[in-house]
Amino acid sequence: MAREAFFLQFAKEIRPQLKKTVVYLTGGFRTVPGMVKAIEDGVTDGIGIGRPITAEIDFPSKVLSGKVQSALINPFDQDFAISNIASNTQMWQAQQTPYNPNVDINEGIMDMSDEKVEEHFRVAVQKYAEELVALAKSGKPLYGVFNYTPEQLCEKVAA
Ligand SMILES: Cc1cc2nc3c(=O)[nH]c(=O)nc-3n(C[C@H](O)[C@H](O)[C@H](O)COP(=O)(O)O)c2cc1C
């Protein structure tokens, strides 16, 4: 638990020097006990969360209301390159899904804790990476995000 956040030790060391600053520590926080401990230990005033929120937009409110004790499992969490692409994709997926107060706010966002989604995304992102390399080699600009939905890949696999 002590190692959940990447910069816990670093924050612990510099925190005493910061007299007029509110400290927010970001990177690696996934469980509520880990977040609470960091605050109770005086390492940080607040918790910053990146990648878990693109998977579950309402994660902060679920944490604050006690509905969840941890973020969704992300099998790519230890690989920042892939999980960063995945986060951008999830933001794109969220944007593709019109807001409907009667539907879960995370509707349309891939849930990588689902093994099938993980498997599909692993294949698709590999192909996307190869396309990026080819673009870079031909001197063309790289822009945009990976517009991917698990359904699209299923269709491709089935075809
Ligand atoms: C899609 C995406 C975009 C990000 N953009 C920025 C940024 O513009 N500036 C920045 O300092 N960090 C950026 N980050 C890093 C996050 O703020 C955060 O430090 C990092 O994701 C580690 O936290 P996490 O383990 O909770 O994801 C970005 C991360 C992701 C996944």
Image (spheres, grey):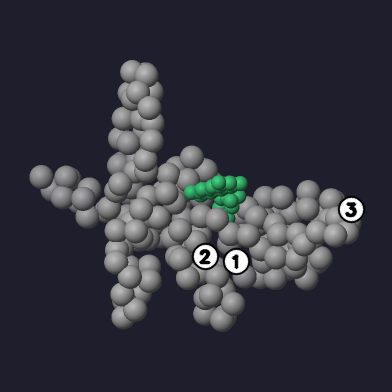
Decide: few, some or many residues near mark 2? Use Cα within 10 Å; few <14, some 14-19, many ≥20. many
Q: Is residue 9 above or below residue 67?
A: above
Residue at 52% of width from left, 80% of height from top? 67
Pointer 1: what residue?
Answer: 31
**Mark nearer the N terminus (3 vs 2):** 3
Numbered mark located on residue 71 in the image: 2
CB atoms at circles 3 and 2 under 8 Å apart? no
List x then y, in percent, for residue 68: 53, 75
Q: Nearer the viewer, residue 132 or 83?
A: 132
Side of 144 where 151 appears, left or right: left
Q: Is residue 24 above or below residue 101?
A: above
Distance of label 2 from label 1 (alpha carbons)? 6 Å
Side of 48 where 152 appears, left or right: left
Distance of label 1 from label 3 (alpha carbons)? 27 Å
Q: Secondary structure at mark 1?
A: loop
**Mark nearer the N terminus (1 vs 3):** 3
Q: Amino acid at mark 3?
A: Gln
Q: Quadrant of the N terminus?
A: bottom right
Q: Quadrant of the C terminus?
A: top left
Depth check, mark 3 against mark 2: the one in front is 3
Pointer 3: what residue?
Answer: 17
List x then y, in percent, for residue 141: 38, 27
Q: Amino acid at mark 1?
A: Thr
Q: Secondary structure at mark 3?
A: helix
Q: Does residue 35 appear anywhere in the picture? A: yes
- Ligand 1 is within 8 Å of the C-beta of the residue at disc 3: no
Residue at 85% of width from left, 60% of height from top? 20
Q: Secondary structure at mark 2?
A: loop
